[in-house]
Image: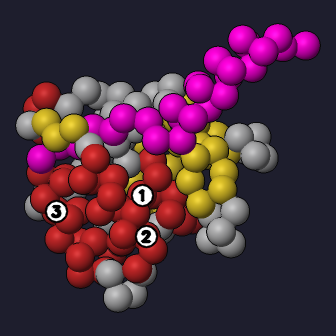
Amino acid sequence: MMNSTQAAEEARRKAADDDPPVMLSTTDADRLSSLAASAARRSPEVAQRLLAEIDRADLLPPDELPPDVVAMYSYVEYRDEGTGAARQVQLVYPHEADIAQGRISVLTLVGAALLGLRAGQAILWPKQDGQERRLTILRVSPQSLAPRA
């Protein structure tokens, strides 16, 4: 059983997880800002959330982004804390998405949630039905197979 000090610390930790710090490369931020703006009519909630994440992100030159940060084309293993289910996905642009191949679009609620997080971080994020779920980043592998622009 937790005492009041432990319970308060747990509540502070969970609140910090709701909005953990995020990092993005300047290249991803520029491309994703344009993408979100163009997708605002089709997917207003996701576009708004993606733009909010970009706005609050620490922006770094691409070669200074740590390898354990989820960037475009990163391979990510995450766990949905509500169900305990773990998934491995690659974060891609909408035209490259293929759920059967594990490639999820950054213009999905899960894709936008994962962007910019580091291994070990968790975020509280809405599902399509409006309920919230906590996603925890278990592992990030760099974007070694990113297509050439």
Contact (Cβ within 8 Å) of mark 1 with mark 2? yes
Q: Nearer the viewer, residue 141 or 23?
A: 23
Residue 19 falls inside the magenta stretch: yes
Identify which amino acid the numbered label 1 is placed on: Ala
Residue 10 falls inside the magenta stretch: yes
Residue that appears at 46% across and 52% down: 113
Answer yes or no: is residue 127 visible. Answer: yes
Circle on res. 112: 1
Which stretch did the figure color magenta? 1-26
Identify which amino acid the numbered label 3 is placed on: Arg
Q: Nearer the viewer, residue 83 or 130?
A: 130
Label 2: few (<14), some (14–19) or many (≥20) C-alpha neighbours in 10 Å: many
Picture quarter with the C terminus = bottom left
Q: In this view, does 104 lie to the left or right of 35?
A: right
Q: Where is residue 12 in the image (x, y as percent from the top left)?
A: 59, 26
> Callout 1: helix, strand or loop?
helix
Q: In which quarter of the image is residue 99?
A: bottom right
Circle on res. 44: none
Identify which amino acid the numbered label 2 is placed on: Val
Q: In which quarter of the image is residue 142?
A: top left
Q: Report which residue position mark 3 lands on.
A: 31
Q: Is residue 4 left or right of residue 115?
A: right
Q: Where is residue 73 in the image (x, y as percent from the top left)?
A: 32, 50
